[in-house]
Image: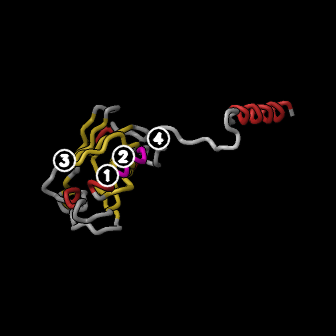
Amino acid sequence: MLLALSFANSIFVLQGYGQSTATPSRPMENIGTSTRLLSSGMPKREAAYYGLFWGVDELRAKAVESGELIRFSYRVLDANKAKALNDKKIDAFLLSKDGHAKLVVPSLEKVGQLRQTNTPEAGKSYWMAFSNPGRTVRRGDRVSVVIGHFHVEGLLVE
């Protein structure tokens, strides 16, 4: 009972701090830039940049296969701008600042590279997998993906 009472009091106190006494009839306006993060841990403005200049969004890094692979995925908005990401001639790698590692896309004997290299189509999602020997990159780490001139930094590994 005491816990519920103290919780209720804290709500009323916090509501009082959020109100402005100078102009009570006018709602508070946003001042400055928005810093809301997307599920990948990326600010909205940065996500908009990748959509505008590279034709991709929904950039994600996820540990799969018990952490032996890190899967980088993205959705194509503009196929012409996203061609460079699917070009198998351009090397791709993943950098981890936390684990001090540089991961590459493995090439298997019978399968080839663990990377989609077909011509991108708008609205479809594509992926590539980076080998993570020793599991140096883990869930919760921040990583960067580099594919030629394409650089995305600070992706949160899910």
Q: Is disc 4 placed on a helix, strand or loop?
A: loop
Disc 3 marks which residue? 149
Quadrant position of residue 6: top right
Query: Which residue is found at the position 21% from the left and 61% from the top?
Result: 83
Q: Residues within 10 Å of mark 4 (few under 14, many from 20)?
A: few
Q: Circles 2 and 1: CB distance less than 8 Å?
A: yes
Which residue corresponds to mark 4?
35
Is label 1 or label 3 in front?
1
* Left or right of 110, for residue 59: right
Q: Taking 12 as reference, is 132 left or right?
A: left
Q: Residue at x 24, y 58 (%)?
A: 115
| Location of residue 124 with respect to 90 vertically, above or below | below
| Residue stretch in magenta | 42-48
Residue ID at (34%, 48%): 70
Residue type at numbered disc 3: His
Return the residue nearer the eye: 2 or 11. 11
Residue 45 in magenta?
yes
Asked which secondary structure carries label 2, the reply is helix
On residue 46, the disc is 2
Name the residue tied to disc 1. Answer: 50
